[in-house]
Amino acid sequence: MLGRAADNLFWMTRYVERVENTVRLLRATALTALLIESGGNGADTSVWARPLLLTGRMDDFLARYEQLSPGRLMAYMLLDRDNPASVKSVLDRARESARATRHLLTTEVWEGINATWLAITDLHFAALQQQGLDDRLDWLTERCFLFRGALFGSMRRDEGLLFANLGLYLERGDHTARFLASQPERAAATEDPAAKVREYYEGTALLKALGSYRAYRETYSSNIEFPRIAELLILHGTVPRSLRGAVDEVVNSLRALNPTADSLKAAHELQYRLQTIQIGHVRRVGLRAFLLDFSKELDEISGQIQRDFMMVQ
């Protein structure tokens, strides 16, 4: 496969996964704010700042919108084409990558991503509010699921699907790591009832945002606790959005593409660390430091994949 085609397939799925991750982040933010407020703690603007801090867009947002509010945040993160991290901007890039490799995609994959792009390309915030923000966020999540269903249900099991798989799981692992790292620091244990309530609400929102609430309940019999959330989403390979699960998928795809590739060696080293590390060691290193280091290693693996397979001569 030509490097340019592999690159477009890689970024097509990476961008679609980024759309879903952004939507999940916004839903988690709204749910956390709602639960904290209903729990009697009042409005908390710091909750609404988290998507901007996670995506590195705080300065740009304040320069153009001046004041943070839920409505302005949603408009900026969903529909603002001047924001490269917005759903509309990322979906533009996903559709362009798909269009460039239209001849390699099945009709189901192309029509799925194109129909989603058409439905949102001219959407404005007033119309979004009229349609119902929650309904539209649910719709976007469903469209991403349908895209993956078409991808894995209609594409041949060849190089194209392997490159698409790499983009998807590198993006997913990076988002999970950054999302966990963006959580506020918490004491190991607290007897403050208000702090316990807030931790429960935020933990529930976090697990739901990463599609792991049921997995947590099936794995642990305890109440929702952030140390256990971290353990589940870092080390449990059976959880789809865990770091271990994402790296396992990357290793499998690279091994099928080229078992001697430098990128496979780097990915396999990262996989081995996740297989052998204990959560106690992660805590001693520092959870945030561990997660940011993991994201950096994923970025390096992504760059090596592009050097191994996608450099256009």
Image: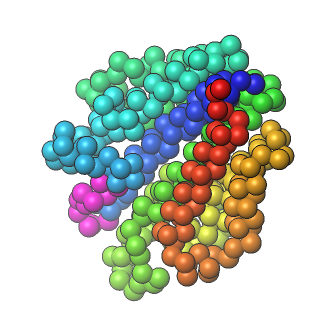
Q: Reply above or below: 212 against 274.
A: above
Q: Position of residue 21 (x, y in %)?
A: 50, 44
Q: In the rendering, at what x and y percent does residue 12 appear? A: 58, 29
Above or below 211: residue 276: below
Q: Residue furthest left?
A: 66
In this view of the protein, can residue 225 be seen by the observer? no
Query: Relative to 146, is 182 on the left or the right?
Result: left
Q: Main secondary structure of the magenta part?
A: helix
At 45% across and 24% down in the image, what residue appears? Answer: 92
Which residues lie in the magenta part?
A: 38-50
The verdict on residue 236 being magenta is no
Residue at point 58%, 72% (across, down): 228
Which of the 4 image quadrants contains residue 32?
A: bottom left
User: What residue appears at the point 16 percent right and 47 percent down from the top-left corner?
Assistant: 67
Name the spot of residue 125 as percent of width and height, x first: 28, 28
Colouring scheme applied when the structure was drawn: rainbow
In the current view of this chain or complex, which residue is farthest to the front? 313
